[in-house]
Amino acid sequence: MYFLPENLDKYVVDHSEQEPKLLQQLTRETYQKVLQPIMLSGPYQGRVLSMISKIIRPKSILELGTFTGYATLCLAEGLDKDGELHTIDINEELVDFQRKYFDKSNFGSQIIQHTGSALDILPQLNQTFDLIFIDADKPNYSNYFHLIIDKLNPGGIILSDNVLWHGKVVEPLDEKDKSTKAVLDYNILLKNDERIETVLLPIRDGLTISRKK
Ligand SMILES: C[S@@+](CC[C@H](N)C(=O)[O-])C[C@H]1O[C@@H](n2cnc3c(N)ncnc32)[C@H](O)[C@@H]1O
């Protein structure tokens, strides 16, 4: 889905950084071997994630929803040289695929994979983070926020993906559509929570930046 006219969207992409070759390979193999390749962050959002991470220079990153590791590697580009990135996905069939690409990158030894539901794994992580990327199942976004907010360092950043949910956030709500309802509730939660300040960016499917005060 394009929020900008297609030709303007192309102009934006053409005048931004190109994705690294390794991520092109990862994308190709994801399209060949994995269901729902559309879940990849993609080249433009990937460069945005990389840029944000490089600006922050986090010592610790947490990602919810690894999929095939595209955004993981983009976020890792900004990681402090002694830092670590924890990434969680419920789909155990993707673990070897992810590891293959992590080890081909410069960040393999800094990336720690967790397999299982983020709802179960988050309470077991006894550390705090400078940057957290939420990109797992939408119905749990608000639950994830409550589980991570105390693990986010002061000044730390939460990036939340798909917050415009293909534009459905401004369409009449079908009460059976749990994901749209969850995204609507989540966007209100971020806007109203006094512990953070929030800006929703119309990047790709919507990317919110929230900064802990
Ligand atoms: C949109 S994809 C993530 C895309 C990835 N961040 C990227 O940019 O390429 C969502 C992922 O969340 C995972 N997921 C769904 N429910 C989950 C849960 N309860 N806990 C952890 N991961 C979950 C799915 O298996 C899927 O790989």
Image: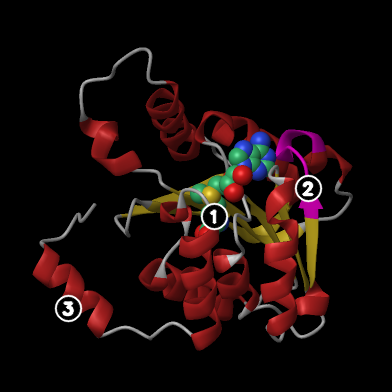
Placement of 76 over or under 22, stated as above or below: above
Q: Are marks 2 and 3 in contact (CB under 8 Å)?
A: no
- The residue drawn where x is 68% and y is 78% is 79
Of residues 98 and 5, the one nearer the viewer is 98
Cα separation, mark 1 vs mark 3, equals 30 Å
- The residue drawn where x is 60% and y is 61% is 68
What residue does disc 1 label?
34
What residue does disc 3 label?
11
Density class for disc 2 (Cα within 10 Å; few <14, some 14-19, many ≥20) is: some
Is there any visible trace of residue 213 in the rendered image? no
**Mark 2: which secondary structure?**
strand
Is there any visible trace of residue 73 in the rendered image? yes
Place of residue 12 in the rendered image (x, y in percent of width and height, measured from the top left): 22, 76
Place of residue 180 in the rendered image (x, y in percent of width and height, measured from the top left): 38, 28
Place of residue 182 in the rendered image (x, y in percent of width and height, measured from the top left): 46, 27
* Amino acid type, mark 2: Thr
Establish whether ligand 1 lies closer than 8 Å to the Cβ of label 1.
no
